[in-house]
Every structure is written in structure tokens, then in C-alpha cells.
Image (cartoon, rainbow, N blue to C red):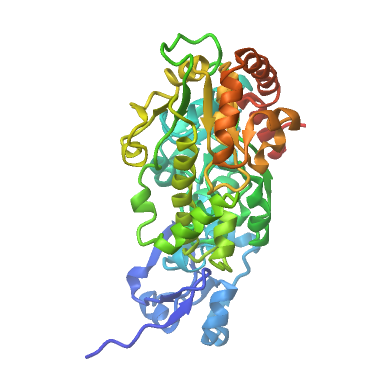
Amino acid sequence: MQRPQRIRIKNESGKLQSLPDEKEYFQELGGSGDILFLGIGPNPDLLTEFFPDESCYYYIECPEYEKQIPSLLTLPANFKKLQTNDATTVNKNNFRLILYTPNKRLFPSFWEPIISKLTLHKTEIHSKKQSKSVWIPGDDNSLLVPEISKAFARADFTYRVIAPDAMRRNMLSLLKQELPAIVFSINFNGLDNSGETFFLLREAGVKVVVWMVDNPFHVISGIKSAYWKEVPMLVTDDWFIKPLQDLGATKIEHLPLATDPEIFNPNVPSYPGLANRIVFAGRSSFPKKVNFFAGCNFSPEDERDAIYAIDSGIKPNFEWWINRDKLTSLWPEPNVRDSGFRAEQTGTIWRTETLKFAGNNLTVFGDEGWRELLPKVDLRKPIDYYTILPAAYSNSAIVLNMTSPLLPNGLTQRNFDVWAAGGFLLTDKTPGLSIFPDELVEECSFGTPSELPQLCSKFLADPQLRIELSKKWREIILKNHTYQNRIDNILKFMDLKT
């Protein structure tokens, strides 16, 4: 006999999702006493079959779910609805809790806070004393984790670097060991897509903050729950603040990148052979690019438009592409990655064209992808960020920086690290440079690749001017733009420092 077709409703992302009604989709969460259903599924009549010995069926239900299942509004008298703010629902001895498991995918922003509250009240976590510590999802090789860890330590925090999978999988066990003051995530690392980890931490009294150091819409394109809007966020590129707020982000501020002067300083070992060289150190494309942008397209027409814009003095960045593509929604639809891919491909063109204008003195430290893009360049193997790169910056004549079009107002680590190392940087112009003095920015930046030859010739011919400007820049960087400065900003943002 053919099985009846399952009911389908729209979840919180607006996608149709089927509603299973078998008993295995009702998960016991513990507790004793009367049953409290966290969601009653599409067919309440089946609950009296699955759990026949109950005289009363207490339940909580999501309003958005109820709107789409009108029959839930006329339940039998032995079904008693509780409001989510009813104090009895969090008393761990009153109820035997049963979760309709599809809820975690249907309306996670509604259910995860409730589940977290009920889960934590079955533990002794709330009674633990909070420590002055910070948890950082990642490992010792993760982006910015070493710098942030050291900076928190200098601010008198203990820190713990936790593998992202362990953070998501073992949060309750981790909280039983220690109740930290802060969880500091980079690009939502360590936080799951439904919000379970975030709401558990928030319910436990732990402050969570996410620092978006890449394009935020690429990060949240993988998150289908709207919970991200409740997460306090910092962005390295302030262009994204308004579009994220327009989508509902509740707490968001600008926090640029910075430098660690213990790593980048003029007292590094020498790197011979670069004294008269123009240096660029960077990848031809970011790792796992093919997988991340699977299915995205950059057509010959797209390439033509990008090159035409560059030749016309325009950098086709992420904003340019979403306007050109007439993108009307940046979330939850995943097609934001299509525009992002075109901006990323434009970045390859932008960097390559700029490096072509750098002349014969150019040395590139990077991957073999540069061989195809710049066949005649002096290409050398990638160098370690923490050990060799400071010496390359300090000992070269000029270092070049090209900012990714994925960040319309963004900066890169080079905008801070090169000056801290005592080097000299020429960078493409971006509104993000407004955090520095205008007169220094004007001296050391270019608007289009074609401006670069004259600028390089000027500074190669005047080493003393390079030294003077480098000292001015370094003074400003060390005063205002170290990761220690950023930790102060983070603590103020989280209301942990006045």
C-alpha cells in the first residue's frame, strides 16, 4: 500500500521541508513526571498511540509552525499548551522531556534557546564560578588564533584553543570542566549551523563574539538558521555593517585587522638579495576555492566586463558585482556566492595586472599558480608567515599589497605587518585606509595598476624617503593598530571593559 504523502511546510529559511511522523522522530531528553513535548509533530493523534499511558499531554509549539498546521489550534482537551516563559518548563523535576527532532532544522531560532535552557537546568553548570578565561575555536595553525591568544593573555585572560568539532560536539562536557567568560570565534568557527552551541553558551552566561575577517556573506551562506542575527559580530570591513543590519543583525561593529609587533619588527634576521627588489608575498588563489565555489560561473562576458572596468579606473569589487548581477537578497539564498566568485576571479585579474606593472624588479613569494599568470616572474616558494615573512618585508625595497575585491572597504595583514617590520608598502586604495592619516595614505597608495610604475620609480630612487615614511607609519601602527589594541576594542564591545 502506498504511504500517504507527508505534510510539507516552509522552514525559517523559507524552504519547503517534509514532516515525518514516526515515533523515532520523538527523542527522549530525560526528566521524569508528566510528558512535555517540545513540538507535537504534524499528527497529534499519533502521540496518544506512541505514549498511551498519559492523562495529560503538555506541549510547547513554535508559532510559525502552528500557522502552517491549522489543525493544531483545535487539539483535544488533554493537550495543554505551555508558553515558553512559563517557569515550570525549566524545573528539571517536573517533566519528562520529548523533542520532535525535525524542529532543530525547521525553526532552530525558536527551538534552540528553549532546548538549551532545559538542557542546562539538568546540570550544575549554572552554579559554577565563571573564570577569567577565553575559549578560541581552532588550532595553533588557524587563522589569527596565535595572535589573538597571546593578546588575550597579555590582557590577563587565560585562554584555551579548542578544536571546532569538539566545541560543537562536546559543549556540555566542556562547560562542566570550566565556565569561561568569553568564546571568541573567527568566521563562526566552532559554532554550528542551527545555533545550538551559541544558545548553550548564552544560557550558561558565556559571552560569545564572532569576528568576521572574510566576506561575511560567504560565511553565513552556509548557515540556514537566523540565529546568526543574535550573535554579536565584528567585521574587518565596515561596508558590511549596513547590509547585515538590514537583514536583522542586532549587535555589530567595525574591527580592522592589526599586527603582532613581537612577530613583525625590524630586529628580524636579514633576508639577502631583496635590497633592490619589489616584493609580493601571497597566493594566486585561496585554498579550497574550487570546492567552496562549486557550481559558480565566471563567463567570458563577466571577464570582459571586469577587465573593462579595471581599464576604466574602477575596481570591480563585491559591491560592484552584486549590483551588476542585480542581486536582491544576500541571505538566506546561496546565490550570493555567484557574485562572490566573480569578485574573487576579478581579484586574480586585479593582482595579476598590478604585478605586471611592477616591472622587472619584481619577486613573488607564492604558489605555482603564479607560473601560469606571470610566466617570466622571479617566483620563489611560499615563506612561513611567522618566521621568514617578517625578514622579507624588512629587507626588501618595496612590498606590494592588493586588497581582495571580496572586501569593498577591506584591508589585509600587509597594511599592518609590513610597516611594523620596518618595511615599505605600496597598496591599492580602498576606503578601509581611512583609519590611517590621509597624508600618509596619499603618499603610499595607487588607484589603478597603471599608476604603479611611476610610484615604484619614485621610491626606488629615494631610499631616504622610504626610511622616513616607514618610521612614521610604524609609529602609528604600534600606537593604534596592534592586536593588543584590538583586544581592548573587543572587551569594550562585549561590555567587559569601560
Camera-nearest residue between 15 and 2: 15
Q: In this view, does 238 lie above or below 64?
A: above
Camera-nearest residue between 244 and 442: 442
Q: Is residue 286 above or below residue 58?
A: above
Question: Residue 182 appears at what percent x and percent y?
Answer: 59, 36
Question: Residue 1 appears at what percent x and percent y?
Answer: 22, 91
Q: Quadrant of residue 27?
A: bottom left
Say left or right for 163 vs 328.
left
Say how many tags the image has: 0
Residue 454 seen in the figure: yes
Say left or right for 495 vs 282.
right
Q: In this view, does 11 lie above or below 199?
A: below
Going by the picture, which residue comes out furthest to the right?
498
Question: Residue 276 appears at what percent x and percent y?
Answer: 48, 16
Camera-nearest residue between 342 and 315: 315
Camera-nearest residue between 114 and 334: 334
Query: Which quadrant holds the C terminus?
Result: top right
Question: Residue 178 appears at what percent x and percent y?
Answer: 51, 33
Residue at image position (52%, 56%) is 308
Residue at image position (59%, 52%) is 312
Going by the picture, which residue comes out furthest to the left?
1
Say left or right for 298 vs 36.
left
Residue 317 seen in the figure: no
Residue at image position (66%, 51%) is 241
Q: Is residue 395 above or below residue 117?
A: above
